[in-house]
């Protein structure tokens, strides 16, 4: 006969493993919130839909302190303002409390509202290692009518990269000459090391011919394009999670530890700028993400 107060060892092990998995899921979710990979409004919706999920079992105190620029003192003031007990979990909030928290989140962390209309100039940007190049290549493969712009860069080629296909690899002197001659639509220094720029002439020819052009560039470049061509459609590519982004960067194996750390710091800054873009696309599946970006073209 099984003693209800002393479950078999196999049950205790299973329960322990389940508890560890739940803690890890909540920890990963907090990293996604703090790095802005996941909007806090989405976390609240997940908690409302499933109280037993990682979002649903997250304590309100943990949720608030995971938000950017929210410390313990500010957290306590927010809880008092919203009349929410600090022992509450997100999935256990009442209807009034969820509504009050949702309104506060919308005011404090406004979400991207998709821009109406379509443009023949698409700009794809996002944090380092998010897979911009892979998604852009898939768009080029599946939608050959869209011209993928080839950037110039002062960084050396990575294994497998081909001159004129992936980038135009130039030295600093040549890059300076391109800037002075007005040959670049945008240019920027990325990760405080190498410069990247988009040659203007091929884009202008393609647009004049009625083609759609896709620029796969960094955040600084996207801002310059928006200033030069306000009608451009800006798309921000998000990773499925912060842990996935870190894994992709480490797995790529093209940077040393110091460079990886620098790129991850930059990625956090880049993720914070997603509100400047017209559309957000999550790169959890390359084919799906590519189709979603291509669908935004006129």
Image (tube, rainbow, N blue to C red):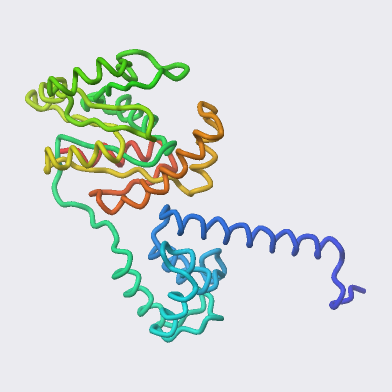
Q: Residue furthest top?
A: 163
Q: Residue furthest left?
A: 208
List x then y, in percent, for residue 145.
21, 25
Residue 180 sits in which quadrant?
Answer: top left
Drawn side of residue 81 relative to residue 229, left or right: right
Drawn side of residue 215 relative to residue 54, left or right: left
In this view, 255 is above or below 64: above
Q: Residue furthest right?
A: 1
Q: Residue at x 25, y 36 (%)?
A: 221
List x then y, in percent, for residue 195.
31, 27
Q: Residue at x 19, y 19 (%)?
A: 178
List x then y, in percent, for residue 41.
38, 65
Looking at the rendered structure, the number of numbered marks drawn on it comes to 0
In this view, 154 is above or below 109: above
Q: Residue at x 39, y 46 (%)?
A: 238
List x then y, in percent, for residue 176.
22, 20
Depth check: give the residue in front, 139 or 156. Answer: 156
Drawn side of residue 26 relative to residue 123, left or right: right
In this view, 235 is above or below 8: above
User: Which image quarter holds the C terminus?
Assistant: top left
Depth check: give the residue in front, 3 or 191. Answer: 191
Q: Residue at x 27, y 39 (%)?
A: 220
User: Which image quarter holds the N terminus?
Assistant: bottom right
């Amino acid at each position: 006969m099984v003693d209800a107060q002393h479950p078999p060892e196999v049950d205790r092990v299973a329960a322990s493993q389940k508890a560890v998995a739940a803690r890890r899921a909540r920890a990963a979710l907090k990293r996604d919130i703090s790095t802005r990979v996941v909007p806090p409004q989405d976390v609240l919706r997940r908690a409302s839909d499933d109280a037993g999920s990682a979002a649903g079992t997250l304590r309100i105190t943990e949720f608030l302190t995971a938000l950017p620029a929210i410390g313990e003192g500010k957290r306590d003031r927010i809880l008092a303002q919203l009349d929410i007990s600090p022992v509450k979990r997100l999935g256990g909030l009442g209807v009034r409390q969820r509504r009050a928290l949702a309104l506060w989140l919308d005011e404090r962390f406004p979400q991207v509202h998709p821009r109406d209309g379509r443009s023949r100039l698409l700009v794809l940007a996002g944090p380092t290692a998010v897979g911009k190049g892979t998604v852009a290549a898939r768009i080029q493969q599946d939608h050959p009518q869209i011209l993928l712009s080839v950037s110039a860069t002062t960084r050396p080629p990575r294994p497998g990269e081909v001159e004129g296909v992936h980038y135009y690899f130039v030295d600093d002197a040549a890059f300076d000459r391109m800037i002075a001659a007005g040959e670049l639509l945008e240019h920027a220094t990325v990760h405080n090391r190498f410069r990247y720029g988009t040659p203007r002439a091929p884009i202008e020819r393609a647009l004049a011919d009625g083609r759609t052009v896709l620029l796969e560039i960094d955040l600084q470049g996207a801002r310059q394009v928006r200033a030069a061509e306000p009608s451009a459609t800006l798309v921000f590519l998000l990773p499925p999670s912060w842990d996935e982004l870190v894994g992709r960067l480490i797995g790529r194996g093209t940077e040393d530890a110091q460079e990886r750390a620098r790129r991850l710091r930059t990625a956090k800054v880049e993720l914070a700028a997603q509100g400047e873009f017209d559309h957000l696309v999550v790169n959890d599946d390359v084919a799906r993400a590519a189709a979603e970006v291509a669908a935004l073209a006129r």
